[in-house]
Image: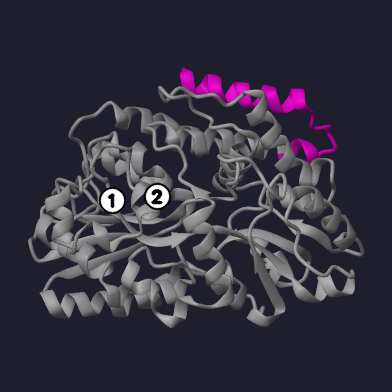
């Protein structure tokens, strides 16, 4: 995994040196777009419980678009562990899809490659205008002061999920509001094969998201005002150590969690192996693992204190998925029409309700499907206590390098090595040096 991630970093550096290379093009087959005006290729990200699940969800919706427009859409669902690599390869080669999903945290990085269509006011007006979208979601679609490089498709925020039965059995009456309370509760839930929390130490992207949130709470931004990396400041070190310590020193996460990849922590929580979970809109995934909504509670992610100072009252990144268009698509009009379809109020209700996410389209949010207890919490967090990851060209490298550094720290802890402030600083310094080379 580390070799793959570093290859992606190198590819990104190459992509950011280009001014016009991008996807769409005249390629055909599994890697590319099309050369026919009545066809589109769409790379969707894995949102459901499996790639097949996504195909089952998206195919009937895409068929609606095909019937209305006469445009054939070739769908490919791309796993998260290869999506960024695939996008970067398409950006550098010019052989890619017409339309694609991107993690919203990658927006500024991919924007800098000049490979994606810029959504200026005229183009946004073709899909109903910028005012249709929740401002925080649109803010995570590109660098500040520039036209967005994508359009919000699914919005998410982190929340604390907790097992009601396990809490009751341990005599815990309410979810923790601070991290001190979180660790104390975690210790009370740990024992006899169960643990306080499930984490994914082997998932660099998930690691980096928590590094950002903990970092904001400690006063770290990971980049300075000029966009230079500041990974190893005392505040950043404290933030990363606090998260890794759930396994390393607090012992409220299982040693095996150090190797967990995407969605493995969700399964542990759903099956009663862990009493708490820090996750983005977990409802649909928990249901897929057999856990009923009445069996878990949802609360905001804890803070350092109950009344944190302004600027540190952040308990989630602005999470979500954006939909983008490669600017040299041979069917640019059709690609924009497809984005219009996917962000229509009707489709926003259907898709976000299915995936358990929040529609970034304001009108769609009014549907009663998004008034459940868990989604109400997520919507409140998204609008009041979340912040977008740094919208700088090197953001994707931050996710890779800091996430990998944390993966190594989790591995150290699992091997019985002590995780100290100094060892965390060393790993983050190495990550920063790789960024600067």
Q: Name the disc covering residue 310, or none.
A: none
Check whether the beta carbons of the residues at disc 2 and disc 1 lie within 8 A of each other: yes
Q: Residue at x 61, y 33 (%)?
A: 219
Query: Is residue 99 shown to the viewer in this render?
Result: yes
Q: Is residue 107 left or right of residue 181?
A: left
Q: Residues within 10 Å of mark 2 (few under 14, many from 20)?
A: many
Image location (x, y in percent) of residue 13: 37, 28
Please state, as top left, top right, bottom left or bottom right, where the N terminus lies in the image.
top right
Q: Quadrant of residue 407?
A: top right
Q: Residue at x 71, y 79 (%)?
A: 295
Query: Is residue 102 shown to the viewer in this render?
Result: no
Say which residue label 2 marks.
104
Marked residue nearer the N-terminal end (2 or 1):
2
Query: Can you say whether 141 is above or below 169 in the image?
Result: above
Q: Name the disc covering residue 150, or none.
A: 1
Q: Residue at x 86, y 62 (%)?
A: 189
Which span is picked out in magenta? 410-437
């Amino acid at each position: 995994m580390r070799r793959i991630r570093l290859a992606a970093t190198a590819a990104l550096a190459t992509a950011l040196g280009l001014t016009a290379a991008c996807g769409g093009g005249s390629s055909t087959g599994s890697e590319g777009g099309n050369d026919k005006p009545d066809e589109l290729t769409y790379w969707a990200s894995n949102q459901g419980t499996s790639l097949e699940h996504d195909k089952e969800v998206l195919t009937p919706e895409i068929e609606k678009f095909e019937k209305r427009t006469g445009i054939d859409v070739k769908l490919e669902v791309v796993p998260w562990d290869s999506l960024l690599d695939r996008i970067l390869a398409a950006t550098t080669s010019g052989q890619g899809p017409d339309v694609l999903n991107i993690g919203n945290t990658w927006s500024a990085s991919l924007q800098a490659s000049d490979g994606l269509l810029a959504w200026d006011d005229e183009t946004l007006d073709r899909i109903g205008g910028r005012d249709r979208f929740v401002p925080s979601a649109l803010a995570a679609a590109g660098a500040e002061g520039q036209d967005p490089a994508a359009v919000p498709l699914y919005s998410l925020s982190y929340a604390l999920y907790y097992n009601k039965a396990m809490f009751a059995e341990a005599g815990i009456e309410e979810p923790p509001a601070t991290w001190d309370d979180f660790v104390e509760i975690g210790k009370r839930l740990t024992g006899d094969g169960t643990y306080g929390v499930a984490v994914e130490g082997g998932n660099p992207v998930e690691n980096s998201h928590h590094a950002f949130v903990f970092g904001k709470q400690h006063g770290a931004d990971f980049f300075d005002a000029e966009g230079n990396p500041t990974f190893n400041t005392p505040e950043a070190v404290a933030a990363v150590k606090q998260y890794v310590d759930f396994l390393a020193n607090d012992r409220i996460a299982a040693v095996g969690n150090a190797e967990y990849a995407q969605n493995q922590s969700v399964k542990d929580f759903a099956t009663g192996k862990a009493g708490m979970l820090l996750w983005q809109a977990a409802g649909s995934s928990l249901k897929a693992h057999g856990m009923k909504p009445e069996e878990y509670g949802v609360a905001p992610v804890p803070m350092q204190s109950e009344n944190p100072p302004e600027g540190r009252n952040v308990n989630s990144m602005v999470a979500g998925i954006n939909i983008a268009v490669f600017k040299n698509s041979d069917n640019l009009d059709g690609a924009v029409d497809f984005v219009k379809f996917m962000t229509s109020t009707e489709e926003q209700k259907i898709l976000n309700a299915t995936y358990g996410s929040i529609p970034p389209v304001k009108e769609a949010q009014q549907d009663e499907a998004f008034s459940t207890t868990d989604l109400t919490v997520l919507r409140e967090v998204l609008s009041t206590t979340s912040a977008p990851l740094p919208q700088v060209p090197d953001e994707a490298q931050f996710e890779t390098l800091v996430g990998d550094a944390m993966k190594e720290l989790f591995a150290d802890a699992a091997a019985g090595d002590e995780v100290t402030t100094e060892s965390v600083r060393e790993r983050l310094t190495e990550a920063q040096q790789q960024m600067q080379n």
